[in-house]
Amino acid sequence: MGSMKKYVAEFIGTCVLVTFGCGTAAALGCNGAEPNGAYLATALAFGLSVVAMAYSIGNVSGCHVNPAVSLGVWMRGNMDTAKFVGYLVSQFLGGLLGAAFVGLFAGFGSSMGTNALYQGNVGLSLLIEIILTFVFVLVVLGVTDKVENGAVAGLVIGLSLTFVHILGIHFTGTSVNPARSLGPALLKGGEALGCAWVFIVAPLIGGALAAAVYNYLAPKNH
């Protein structure tokens, strides 16, 4: 299948993830300090977005919709460098369009579903995001490593994204995805943009660590 179709699929998938995940957070006024219905609805919106995309574009591009996942797949040796770069560009552009939709729907003065440092602490926020992304990408690599898991992989990955959000929303709003964070931050500006680097760097570190650990646990020749 042509690479361009894969890139378009990743663009669409990431756009949907940001539109519905960040859009739900913005529309419901999700506040990580308040364990209410908006909190759980936001976690579910992100997870269900991945489930929906996994069973629609998964057969085209694998439905990474996340640079941290693509990094893990690349480190696993399941993607060449040129395609990896193409996926990253597609995902970031899709995230930006999704953020534009969120702004149009919920208002650019809303939270836009942006991330924030936990108690203004850069180091702690980095650590939280690294751990959350490590767990999520480890699940992705593990469940997609066996062909027989194909029928349930999308559901497992979506539920895993939901459960890392259930913990992480309270602390940072949960990124685990640089494309999901950068788009809303660019359009929101201010503090959100100022700390956006944390939510780009930390997920990439978490994804790389997950790939390194999984490569150790389950070498390619296993």
Image (spheres, helix red, strand yellow):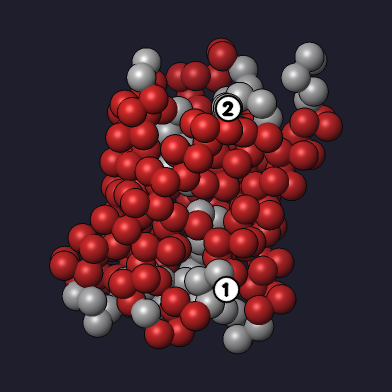
Measured from the top left, where is residue 217 in percent x and y?
82, 30
Q: Residue at x 43, y 64 (%)?
A: 182
Measured from the top left, where is residue 44 in percent x and y?
39, 53
User: Which residue is labeled 2 in the image?
Assistant: 80
User: Which residue is labeled 1 in the image?
Assistant: 171
Which quadrant of the figure contains the N terminus?
Answer: top left
Which quadrant of the figure contains the C terminus?
Answer: top right
In this view, the residue in front, 96 or 160, is 96
Q: Residue furthest right?
A: 216
Q: Disc 1 on helix, strand or loop?
A: loop
* Residue type (three-letter) at the residue carrying disc 2: Asp
Q: Is residue 77 above or below residue 96?
A: above
Q: Residue furthest left?
A: 104
Q: Earlier in the sequence, mark 2 or mark 1?
A: 2
Measured from the top left, where is residue 218 in percent x and y?
78, 25
Cβ–Cβ below 8 Å for labels 2 and 1?
no
